[in-house]
Amino acid sequence: MYLQHGCLLTAVSLCLSVQMGWSGDARPWESFQATVDRLLSLTADSIRSERDAVVSFEELESVVRSLAKVEDYETMLKLARKGRELFPTELRSGVLLGWALGMSAEVETAISTTRAAIVENAARLPDPEGVHRADGLTNLGGFLIQLGNYKGALEYLEQARKAYPNGALPDYLAGLAHRQLEDEVLCARAYEKAFRKDPQLASPGDYVFHAWAEDRMGHLAKAGDILGRAVKRFPAEMGLHVNLGLNKEAQSATREAYYEYQLEVLIGEPDSPYSTEARKRIDRIEKKQLATSFPDPELKAVVLHLKAESEGKREEGAKLLEKVVELSGLKHPYLLSLYTRSLVDQGDYQMAIGYLEGALASSPDDFFLEVDLARAYARAGMTERADELIAKLMLIAPNNAKLKQLIGPMGEGK
């Protein structure tokens, strides 16, 4: 039922990036380069104690992660190989090198390196809780998924779960593998475990996959709840609102589906497949509402309002919008956006601001409400407040072209 969102290989790659984490190193590049040179110059003789071994390797590992973050894979691999040279029989050095090879798209070599590493010792670089061995097993699962060996991946991921039950990534990757094997039951279970352990792990595409799995089992309401969480967390992400609309239509909630389709068009790129699909469904719903003898009163009023506005019949459109307010109570973000934008266009800035600030008091950080409030502030001449809110919104969705169009470069969106 749902439109596919995201790419499996991208998801696996991102997952393996998260697996190792990032150092967040904010040093100037000159200082960073000096650190790289110093680490590359290390020799076995320069590491004089067991404490030196751990400290040196952990610094090297941290820099390897940072280099991967900036996509300097050549230097990253040099450092990872240096780590293996310094600690040739240690589990952690082998797991790190295997991960670095995988991030460099040398997947076959990454697999053989990691397989060898997970059976090695941890004498000089301790792994008391088995976390690093679990990392290696998880990486193997990810590598095999990239190669399309989903069943083989699941074997390693099950070992990783046993080695470190608190880890979320093995469950996450198992969900991806079960998704490719079209086992919706196990896919849903794995995702649920993963996102319960680490909700921040889920990408927009993961939410859609999870909803797909629940939908396949006939759990429409649960799938809808998952997509609802997705649009709350990623409100400016193309594809989520249209998928939520599809779910609502499947539950015979046509009005709510229509509003989600409108939100998809509002934020999406005009020629995206999601916006195109949303417009098709909007058109079909509108035709049905205008033709049926038993329309949804609120939905028909919205449709007639939009039709009047598009035909330049402002007075008629305004009366219909008031009817929408009376029927709906402006409970859906799309309707509140529709109404407050109309108020702003009429110059009634303070009333629009009052509605939006009141709604945000009960729904803090609602993306669409804040977009419209920023516009209202700007049009009312409240520049400082508008700029502050625009800065926040651009951090949430820095590359969303429609957001830039809606707000405008200085908050004067139309």
Image (tube, rainbow, N blue to C red):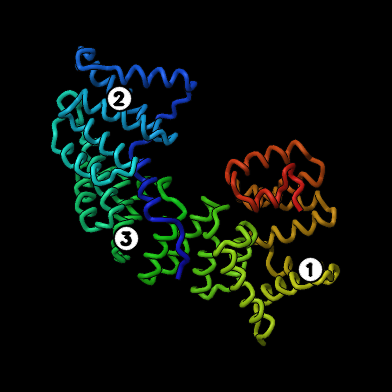
* Residue at the spot of label 3: 187
Quarter of the figure with residue 154: bottom left
Instruction: Name the residue located 23 percent from the left edge and 16 percent from the top edge.
Output: 43
Taking the view exactly as shown, the residue that stands out farthest to the front is 74
> Toward which corner of the image does residue 57 lie, by quadrant?
top left
- Expressed as whole percent of the image width and height from the top left, the position of residue 269 reads 61, 58
* Pointer 1 residue: 309
Q: Is residue 161 visible?
A: yes
Q: Position of residue 42 (x, y in %)?
A: 27, 17
Residue hosting label 2: 58
Q: Amino acid at mark 1?
A: Glu
Q: Nearer the viewer, mark 3 or mark 2?
A: 2
Circles 2, 1 touching at the beta carbon (< 8 Å)? no
| Residue type, numbered disc 3 | Cys
Is 244 on the left or on the right of 335, as rendered? left
Q: Image point 40% across, 50% down: which residue?
A: 10
Determine the residue positioned at 62% across, 76% down.
Answer: 285
Residue 199 horizontal/vertical position (percent): 41, 47
Q: CA distance from mark 2 to mark 1?
A: 63 Å
Q: Secondary structure at mark 2?
A: helix
Separation of residues labelled 1 and 3 (CA atoms): 46 Å
Number of callouts: 3
| Of callouts 2 and 1, the N-terminal one | 2
Mark 2 surroundings: few (<14), some (14-19) or many (≥20) residues within 10 A: some
Mark whose residue sits in front, 2 or 1: 2
Q: CA distance from mark 3 to mark 2?
A: 35 Å
Q: Specify few, some or many for label 3: CA neighbours under 10 Å numbering under 14, 14-19, or 20 or more.
A: many
Q: Is residue 106 above or below residue 294?
A: above
